[in-house]
Amino acid sequence: MISPSPRAPAAFAGWLDDTNDITKAFLAAGNVPDMINIAGGLPDPQVYPSPQIAEIAARAVTDFPAETLGYGPLNGLPELRAAIAARFSSDLLHLTSDNVLITTSGMQGLDLIGKVLLDEGDVIAGQFPTYLGALDAWRPRKPAVRKLLLQSNALDFTDVMRGAKFAYTVPNFSNPTGRLVPQSTRLALVEAAQSTGAWLVEDDPYGGLNYDGPLPPSMLTLSAQSSAAGPNGAYEGPVIYLGTLSKLLVPGLRIGWVIAAPRMIDALTLAKQGSDMCTSGLNQRMACEILKAGLIEVCNPTMLTLYRRRRDTLCAALQRDLSPWFDWDVPEGGMFVWLTARDQQLNTDDLFKIALEERVCVSPSSVFDAEGRFRHGLRLNFTFNDEAKLDEAVRRLARATERLLTV
Amino acid sequence: MISPSPRAPAAFAGWLDDTNDITKAFLAAGNVPDMINIAGGLPDPQVYPSPQIAEIAARAVTDFPAETLGYGPLNGLPELRAAIAARFSSDLLHLTSDNVLITTSGMQGLDLIGKVLLDEGDVIAGQFPTYLGALDAWRPRKPAVRKLLLQSNALDFTDVMRGAKFAYTVPNFSNPTGRLVPQSTRLALVEAAQSTGAWLVEDDPYGGLNYDGPLPPSMLTLSAQSSAAGPNGAYEGPVIYLGTLSKLLVPGLRIGWVIAAPRMIDALTLAKQGSDMCTSGLNQRMACEILKAGLIEVCNPTMLTLYRRRRDTLCAALQRDLSPWFDWDVPEGGMFVWLTARDQQLNTDDLFKIALEERVCVSPSSVFDAEGRFRHGLRLNFTFNDEAKLDEAVRRLARATERLLTV
C-alpha cells in the first residue's frame, strides 16, 4: 500500500545553506578530554547562588501555583514588567509597564526584533565586529548587514544608518571586542537614529560586569532626554534596549526583557505569540523574587572580584606569551579580550584549527563578520576557567601560533 | 545637538499589517468582570500537582546546580532526550536521542519548522480548519496555505500535498474541531507524504486527553513501518511529531519536544540556536524528574474524570439550548466542541461580538481559516470552567444567538 520508492523529502529553507554552525563545532570541542574552552561566553557555575534559588523555586510554585504552572500573559507577568520598568527608570528616564516585554532569554529579544522589522533583504547597520548570535538570529530573514564602525573619529553615523531598519550595538563591553562605547559615541548614535528613523538596538547583557568603574549613561536614557514622552509618560524614543538575567546572575532561567516604545512592545508581543506563546510562569515568578530579594546585588561583588582577577591573569599571560604577534586592550568589563594580529595575513581560522589540536578552543574573528572575511582577530573568554587553566590556555595558544607561523 | 524634528521610525515588517490579533482580544475579554471565557484552550489549574512540582523544583536546583542554572546543550539535556525517545519507542517504532529535540513549548516547535522549511511564499497543506497558533507561527514567512480536508472520502492527499513543504495535522482531537482522525486517514497521509516528499507534521498536544477509549497508532509509528531506518536504527521517516507537557500536566514549564529524522532535528537545532539558544535547564531537569516519577500517569485519571464530566455537561446544555441552530459531534477527547451553524448565513464573527456583550467569550471559526472566510462555526472549550459556569455560558450564548437572529 505504501509507495516502495519514496520521494526525497522537501528541501530546507535557503538560509540553512549558508549558515554558520561554528557554535556547534565549539560544543563538540567541549567534549574532547583536557580541552580548555576559552571560546564561549559562559559564567563560572560557582557564582550561581543555588541554595537561595532552590528555595525561591519551591516557594514560587507553592505560593503561586496557577501563575507558575499555567499559561501566563503574552507580554509577561505584570509584576515582573513593573519591576523591570522601576529598575531602569531614573530622573532622566520614565518607564511604565507598557515599555516592557519579558522574553525567553535575551536571544529571543533579538529573534523577535528580526521578526517584526525585517522583510527579506532589509538593511541592518551592525556594530562591527558583530555578536555571532545576533547574526544567527537574523540570518533566516537574509538581511544586508552594513558595518557600523563605532571607533571611527567622524562620529557621524547617519550615512550608515539611513535606510536601515535598525542599528545593532552592544555599548557595554561589546561582544566580541570587550570595548566600552564612550558617551560621545552613544549620543552620536542616538542622534543618527532620530535623524534617520532607524531603530537603535542597545543589547546590554554585560553592563553588570564592570570591573574598573561606573558606566556612561545608556542610550535608552540619553535618548529619553531628546524624545517626546507618551500620554502616560511612557518612553517613546528610538532605542530598543535588551537585558537578561544570564550574565547578571544565572543563564538557566532564560529570562530576558525588552524596553522600548509601547508600539514596538506591542509588535514584539504579537511576534512572541507565534514563537513560544509566553515565557515560563515559574521562571518569571522566580525572576520577580530574585529582584525583590536583591540577589543580583548580593552576588555581584563576588562575581566582580572573581572575574577581575581572571581578566588580569589572562592579560598577564597574553603579555608574556602572545605580545610578539597580537595587540589587545585590557577590557574594563564583560567577558572577553579581543586580540588582533599585527600581521593581517595571520589567518585566525587556521589558528583556530591548530589551537584545537593543542587542546585550546578560541573564537576566530570570522564568525563575528556577516561576510566571514575578517580573519586576523581572536576572542578569548576569561570568566569560565580558573586562573591556572587560563594561564595554560595561553601557553597552548602560543604554541599553536608558533606552529601556524612555521608552516 | 539632537535634531529637533526626528524622522518617523522605520516601518514594521509586512506580515504585521495583516496579522490576526484575536488572541489579544480574547485576553482583554478575560479582564471583564463576570465574563465566562470558553474561547481559550486552558487547563483547569486545580489539576496541577503543585506540591509535588514544588519539591521537584527545589531538588532539581539543589542536586543539579550547574545544569539547571547554566547554559545547556542547544538540542536539550541528554537525559531528557533519551527519556522522550524511550517513552515514544515501541516494537513498531525505534527512536534514539538523535531523533529528539527539546523545545521551549510546542509552539516553538511550530515556529522552528517554519524557520527551517519555509522560504517566503512556500506552500503548506494545512488540515482545515487549522489551529490559530500554527497560522500565527508561520505568518512571518507569508506561506500559501492549501486546505487539507481530512474528512474527505477520497483519502488521496497527494494532489494537495504535492509541491508543499509540509502538511500540518492534529490527528488526536484536532484543534479546533475536536475530531479524532481515523487510522485509514492517517495511513493515507503517510502514503501521500512518502509519495510527494512533503514532510508530515503531527502536532499532538491532546493525545493524553482521551475520554472514551484508546487511540489509533500515531502517524510517526505508522510511517516507521514503511520507512528505512538510519545506521543506528534511528527513525528516518517523513513525520515531524510535536509533543508538549502543557496539556499532559502543566503549561507553565513551557517544555515541548520534536521527534523526527536526525537531519530534520539537526536543522531545527540550528534554528533554535537563533531563537533562544537553549531551553531552560531548570525546566528541562524538572521535566526529567516528572517523567521519572510517573507524575503524568498519576494525574491523568483525575484529569480525565474531571474533563469528561465537563464535556458531557457542555454537550447536554448545547442540546438543550442550541440544537435549533447548530450541529456538533461529541468529541472523544481533547478540549473543544466544534459547532457549525445549519444556516451558513449565520455569521459567527457577529455572534462573537454579541456574545461578548452577553459576557461569554467564544472562538469564531474565521480565526481557524488562513483566509478568514469560514464564518459559520464556533469552537467552545470545556476544560477550564466548572459545570455551573459551562451551563451558564451556553445560556448566554443562546441569548446571543437569538439576538443575532432577530436583528
Image (spheres, coloured by chain):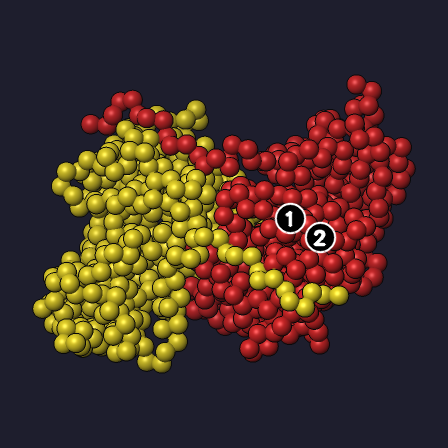
Chain colours: A red, B yellow
Tag 2's secondary structure? loop
Quadrant of the image occupied by residue B361: bottom left
The image position of residue B282, as x and y in percent, is 54, 55
Q: Which residue matches tag 2?
A: A157
Farthest residue in the top direction?
A407
Total of numbered circles in the picture?
2
The image position of residue A22, as x and y in percent, is 62, 35
Q: Measuring 79% from the left and 27% from the top, which residue is drawn there? A: A345
Mark 2 chain? A
Tell me which label, 1 or 2, sits earlier in the chain: 1
Q: Measuring 80% from the left and 31% from the top, which residue is drawn there? A: A344
Q: Which residue matches tag 1?
A: A125
- Is residue A363 at all visible to an observer of this figure? yes
Task: Tell me whether circle 1 and circle 2 mark residues in contact (CB < 8 Å).
Answer: yes
* Side of B231 relative to B276 (left or right): left
Q: Measuring 28% from the left and 33% from the top, which residue is drawn there? A: B162
Name the front one of labels 1 and 2.
Answer: 2
